Image (cartoon, grey):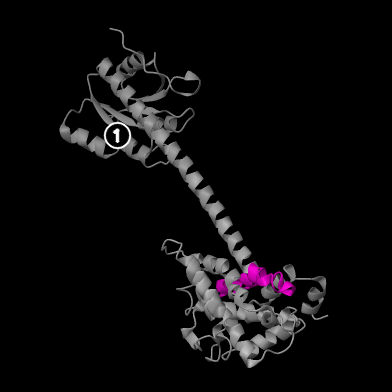
Amino acid sequence: MIYSKMPRNNVMNAKPTLLVVDDTPANISLLREILKDQYKVKIATNGVKALEVAVSKPAPELILLDIMMPEMDGYQVCERLKGDEATRDIPIIFLTAKAEVIDETKGLAMGAVDYITKPISPPIVLERVKTQLTLKEARDFLKNQNELLEQKVQERTRMMEQLQDVAMVAMGSLAEARDPETGNHIRRTQRYVQRLAIQLKEHPRFSEFLKPQNITSLYKSAPLHDIGKVGVADHILLKPGKLTEEEFNKMKLHTVYGRDAIAAAETALDETDDNFLVFAKDIAYSHQEKWDGSGYPEGLKGDEIPISARLMAVADVYDALISRRVYKPPFPHQKAVAIIQEGRGSHFDPDMVDAFLEVEDDFYSISQEFADSEEDLKVKAGF
């Protein structure tokens, strides 16, 4: 009888490679004769050799495995193959004279895809092999499609994150654009916040909050800390002299404007655990609060102030001190550090000031990298 050949879907129509494992020469000869027209056949006469051949090139696409072999039986070989990442996905068909249901159940439980009993029937062998290779081809196709889809999802996620970051910087720049003397302020402050958060991530008071995901969200949120300034009139925002009490009260409203603007944007997002606008809203509204309760807009005190806002308070004040403003020249780095240290326990969270002092050199490096001008570089350096 002539048996129909399996379609060859491999590259260049190459024959699929099979591995036959059996310690009986007569069985090997029979299987080779059955399979040779349609498949490339590799042979192993014991379990150890089978494990070697299974990882050689070209790798077998299916293994026909005898169970009753000396030293290492088929069950042991199967267990080893399924435990190796390089061979775990190769389908295994057991070939054996053990015809009890318990034996078949054991083989299938170990990961075999089929179980053929001896004496061998050529049509059965060919059809079972064909079926399992077709199923493997389908599984491999789905796996490749899933990997491709995952790559596309990851790439799309990266693009969305980049767009998100650009949008945040652009929105923050709307406020900064009204004050041309602070062009790199948002870039510096977001890096200050990130560096201070990393320094504090192991601190007992902050470790629960400062997880890597939250630190990333804080970095993204920082550019929006002064977004509310777009609602402050120019004659107040750009006034070179001291503000009157009325003007200062209007200036303080930038925290409310910022919170409300971000809250409005937040309604357009689905509720997710990684909604970084939650941090942005806290930062915009509360970064002018002070540790001793003398800040605004609510006069929050101590741990009532969100951690995100306390981090921004240190970053924002440091940058304000070293930067040129319409109402003041830039201060040297060491003078800014001294003022921050002086505010420990009054303006700022004491532990955050201690962490700031440990990384002040990094703050200085950031200020240098994103300086607004060559002149400011010299001032920050103390010249």
Residue furthest top in the image: 1
Q: Can you give x and y, in whole percent of width and height, for residue 125 in the image? A: 28, 20
Q: Can you give x and y, in whole percent of width and height, for residue 365 in the image? A: 71, 71
Q: Nearer the viewer, residue 142 or 372?
A: 372
Q: Secondary structure at mark 1?
A: loop
User: Does the rendering let one see residue 159?
Assistant: yes
Give the residue displayed 56% in from the left and 78% down from the top.
311
Amino acid type of disc 1?
A: Ala
Q: What residue did someone put label 1 on?
A: 112
Which quarter of the image is occupied by the N terminus? top left
Which quarter of the image is occupied by the C terminus? bottom right
Q: Is residue 354 above or below residue 129?
A: below
Q: Residues within 10 Å of mark 1 (few under 14, many from 20)?
A: many
User: Does the rendering let one see residue 308?
Assistant: no
Give the residue displayed 55% in from the left and 85% down from the top.
289
Q: Is 263 left, or right, of 99 in this rendering? A: right
Q: Nearer the viewer, residue 242 or 280?
A: 242
Which image quarter: residue 338?
bottom right
Q: Nearer the viewer, residue 137 or 180?
A: 180
Q: Is 178 left, or right, of 375 in this rendering? A: left
Q: Is 226 left, or right, of 274 in this rendering? A: right
Q: Is residue 172 magenta?
A: no
What span is in magenta?
174-200
Give the residue displayed 70% in from the left and 90% down from the top.
242
Which image quarter: residue 371?
bottom right
